[in-house]
Amino acid sequence: MSIYAISDLHLSFNKPVGLYDIDFESDVDKPMDIFGWERHYDQVRDRWLDVVGPEDTVLIPGDISWALKLNQARYDFDWINALPGKKVLSPGNHCYYAQSKKKVRETLPQGMEWVDADYTLVEGVVVAGTRGWNLPGDRLWDEETDRKIYERQVGRLRIALETAAKEHPDKERIAMLHFPPVTSRVSSSGFMDLLKEFQVTTCVYGHLHGRAHQDAVEGLVDGVRLQLVSCDYLHFKPVPVQL
């Protein structure tokens, strides 16, 4: 059993589809080919099948579906569910359908979990998560619009990690964030402080695409291993979470 991660699948199926019988013209609402992700769902499928087995777990931290409503997102959830392994999902900035954690969990197929300001256990390891947000001082930060959201998200990560630490004090901890906890421009944040405070082993994150990959910070930082898992950065192949 292994734990893998891949984020930002950005699926947009508009009807039930199988793993292989996808009509590019009629089944996909928002093709990612305009970003150079040519039929990326085929690439994700093939590379997922290469590495993930039925007993493995895949963490998917955000931007899973372009759907605006849950009844649309369920087509993307069902497609992911047809791939091997257990899946643990958390929200991203484009997960507009995720207005209610309860309703998302009721919609997910069996074998898929939704983590948001809380945690689950995967193969004896705590996996806690929330969305995260832009960081103060980063190039996209806007004090007026971002501060409140940022502080709320830091608080939600604290809730998740505090609860996990209280209920499972001796278990290793992984954090799932959609936004990076630090970048090449910002060396500290409330998110990073919490990862250190609660002795998180590894934080997987996504959100960064294309030229923004150069903003990524990876490797061991103040005792926390950071791992960018945006699917285009990984060439659409889930990677083992480094513990």
Image: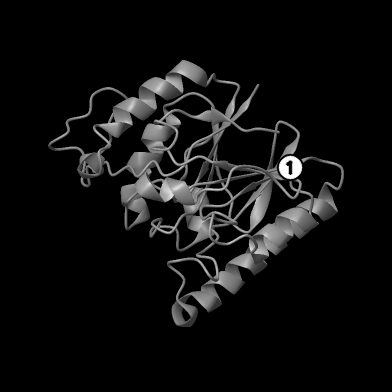
94, 147: nearer the viewer: 147
Q: Which corner quadrant of the image does residue 184 belong to?
A: bottom right
For the point 65% across and 61% down, the residue is 191
Q: Residue 112 in the image: x percent, y percent?
A: 53, 38
Question: In the image, is residue 175 above or below residue 38?
Answer: below
Judge whether residue 163 can be spotted in this image.
no
Q: Residue 120 in the image: x percent, y percent?
A: 67, 45
For the point 66% across and 66% down, the residue is 190
Is 36 on the left-hand or right-hand side of 206? left
Which quarter of the figure is the C terminus placed in? top right
Residue found farthest to the bottom: 144
Circle 1 sits on which residue? 201
Question: In the image, is residue 78 above or below residue 114?
Answer: above
SS for callout 1? loop
193, 79: nearer the viewer: 193
For the point 22% across and 42% down, the residue is 31
25, 150: nearer the viewer: 150
- Counting the numbered discs, the total is 1
For the point 55% across and 20% down, the residue is 54
**Residue type of the residue flagged with mark 1:** Thr
Label 1 neighbour load within 10 Å: few <14, some 14-19, many 20+: some
Is 166 on the left-hand or right-hand side of 215? right
Q: Residue 50 in the image: x percent, y percent?
A: 45, 16
Residue found farthest to the right: 170
